[in-house]
Amino acid sequence: MKKISILFLFLALFFTVKATDNKTIRISTNETDLILKVGDNGRLYQAYFGEKLLNPADVNLFSWEVSRGSDGSAVRRGWDVMSGNGNEDFYEPAVSVLHNDGNPSTILKYVSHTESAVDGGTQFVITLQDDVYPLTVKMYYVAYTDENIFKSWTEISHKEKKPVTLQQYASSMLYFSALSYYLTEFSSDWGKEVQMASQQLLPGKKVIDTKLGSRANMMMDPFFEVGFDAPVQELQGTVLMGTLGWTGNFRFTFEVDNVGNLRVISGINPYASNYELAPNTVFKTPEFIFTLSYNGTSQGSRNYHDWARNYSLKDGMGDRMTLLNNWENTYFDFDEAKLVSLMEGAKELGVDMFLLDDGWFGNGDHARNGDHAGLGDWEVNRAKLPGGISALTKAAGEAGVKFGIWIEPEMVNPKSDLYQKHPEWAIENPNRETHYYRNQLVLDLSNPEVQDYVYGVVDNILSNNPDVAYFKWDCNSPITNIYSPYLGKRQSQLYIDHCRGLYNVLERVKENYPDTPMMLCSGGGARCDFEALKYFTEFWCSDNTEPVERCYIQWGFSQFFPIKSMSAHVTEWNRKASIKFRTDVASMCKLGFDIDLEDLSPDELAYCQQAIQNWNRLKPAILDGDLYRLVSPYETNHMAVVEVTKDKNKAVLFSYDLHPRYAEKVVPVRLQGLDPTRQYLVEEINLMPGRKSDFKANGKTYSGDYLMKVGLDTFTAKDMNSRVIEITAE
Ligand code: DGJ
């Protein structure tokens, strides 16, 4: 008995000594600390995630343990950074692996970690190992110092004899302790992208996910915001903002546990996606990109915008071209002469590029004269365009504009030469009725032969026509009949391998054509994630260009994506809105046009020409400045944003009256981001020819302090009215 007590005493002492030696990993930006600690049991726990601590010594004050007993008693448990299936935690795991012997448990222990400098920040690689099975999970964290952005992902590998089955494989698991949590989510559909809605998170789970395969964000978007102790606000409060860089099915799980703590698990949606992982191969999960802002979403958005421009978005620091697109003007009905006249119109308008949309390819029975045929046959339609693409690039050169072209290379119409030749390249269920979305099927990108073919679409166009200056890459269908003729018995890998196949193609495009800008499009804005945007300079936010609706869409996407990545075109949706209002709404983002210029009066054309010149002049503020959302369309019948150059010398205020109520109360728009100590000249621009500004502050000078504390009376009671105000430091 005595011997046993001595043994216990010895063990207790041993663990006490070890406990004081618990390894601490501090992952920091300028604003935030994520502190991880190794517990006495060797597991890695989240000890702190919040505002940066001033005193380095304070980092050691944290315990790895959290109180989790329902009676408040301290139970020796922590917040596992990669909680595994079968541990003593009773909630959703982040990782779950079925081993060779049929055991489905995973418990990971800390082995080692490294820390190294990377562009813009610090990367940590933490190796975790299951102590019973030869399974390794490497956790990657990158902390971007100035932008206050974190990225995390994992690499899973093993040395078991046969493949293991990955059942859950999150990129990140985070924990929070607050009195209440409020989620802002972004739901979508065609023409209704990024609709923001908030709700309190109560005990239990809230899941945001999609199962669409391709066109993956059509119904829910892969980003969210969580407010702590209060709903998310623009300028106040602590907010977590997160997004997954994955162009396929994603899942965010928000779970409030028995003691009111919140867990957030982010990653690929494991739905119908058990993944067989062979020994000594690596399964890499996508990047989860997150920030904590202590001053509301306004600051959080700027964190993302700066980070994306500096380190992530394709050509993030580069210029962007204005354009004239022909989609809504001609749809499928055009010929060479028509396109040449549009190119000349583009030049007269003053944009940089003419963009030829859908309908230029397919021949004979498979001519692309509507959306029923032709996808897959990327040969020029000889009846419409006898001179081929080269005649078009030549004509564009003569007109003095660049030439861009639309493709949808991941898709096939059953009515196409390609499908006749290679029906096995389409994702289609062999023994069930086929469902079509827009009369088309998704090509099976898990098949390397198909990847070569899709890459070839871009490669053929560019190698034969090096003057093609831009692609609009569309993706109009989700995966409708999930079955891959290529994968055989590994069907449950299709969603993941298909998405990875897309990245293989995009990687080759980027490698061989690094300087060709591309617009990411998916029947509007159904693809918008930061992994895809490593390959695309911009994305098409929505086919809905009705200017009032568009304000909400731009407000929503700007929460995460920099303005220079958000394509916005002036169209004829809602002709009741003036050309000025439509152009002013699009001018807040990456400006383009998709209208019949012949419908414009001389004054309207002159107005557009002037607005394009102004936009070009103000690019340093619009594309590369700081965005401040000032007045929300969700809270008022107006919207206002200001875009300010980094040096605070120039700002552009966009002020929109949407549908004001009769005699409603409006208050001045208070600016942000200016230098309070400097004087600024305030001028209204984008005026219709012959129109004098009726804006009272026009031509006057104010201090930055006044503009930010008192503001400007820019709103009116007029329906669909806008003002663009240029603000220049003296
Ligand atoms: C959907 C896109 O969102 C539109 O802009 C246009 O390119 C059509 N596809 C063409 O089919």
Image (cartoon, rainbow, N blue to C red):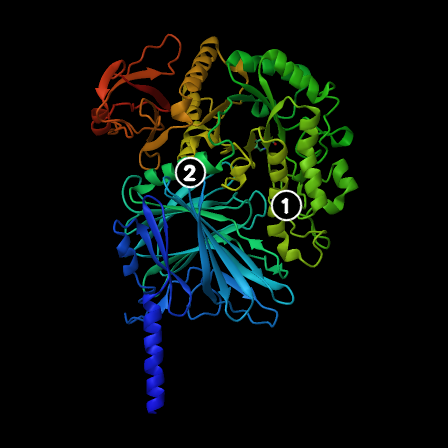
**Which quarter of the image is occupied by the N terminus?**
bottom left
Q: Residue furthest bottom?
A: 1
Residue at 72%, 55% in the rendered image:
431
Q: Is residue 464 left or right of residue 303?
A: right
Residue situated in front as seen by the camera: 220 or 56: 56
On the question of residue 358 being in view, the answer is: yes
Q: Position of residue 211 (x, y in %)?
A: 55, 51
**Neighbour class for label 1 at 10 Å: few (<14), some, many (≥20)?**
many
Label 1 – label 2 distance at C-alpha = 26 Å
Q: Which residue is identified by label 1? A: 501
Would residue 413 be seen by someone viewing this image from the given angle? Answer: no
Residue 8: image x %, image y %? 34, 82
Packing grade of label 2 (10 A; few <14, some 14-19, many >=20) is: many
Residue sitting at 39 percent across and 38 percent down?
A: 559
Type of amino acid under label 1:
Gly
Identified by mark 2, the residue type is Trp
Q: Position of residue 468 (x, y in %)?
A: 63, 23
Say whether marks 1 and 2 touch (CB < 8 Å).
no
The residue that label 2 is drawn on is: 307
Q: Whereabouts is ligand 1, in terms of quadrant?
A: top right
Mark positioned earlier in the residue sequence (1 or 2): 2
Kindly identify the residue that appears in the image at 35 percent across and 20 percent down: 724
Q: Is residue 15 above or below residue 208?
A: below
Instruction: Give the secondary structure at mark 2.
Output: helix
- Relative depth, front residue between 276 and 224: 276
| 364 sits to left or right of 555 | right
Q: Secondary structure at mark 1?
A: helix
**Quarter of the rendering occupied by the C terminus:** top left
Please provide percent x and percent y for residue 18. 35, 69
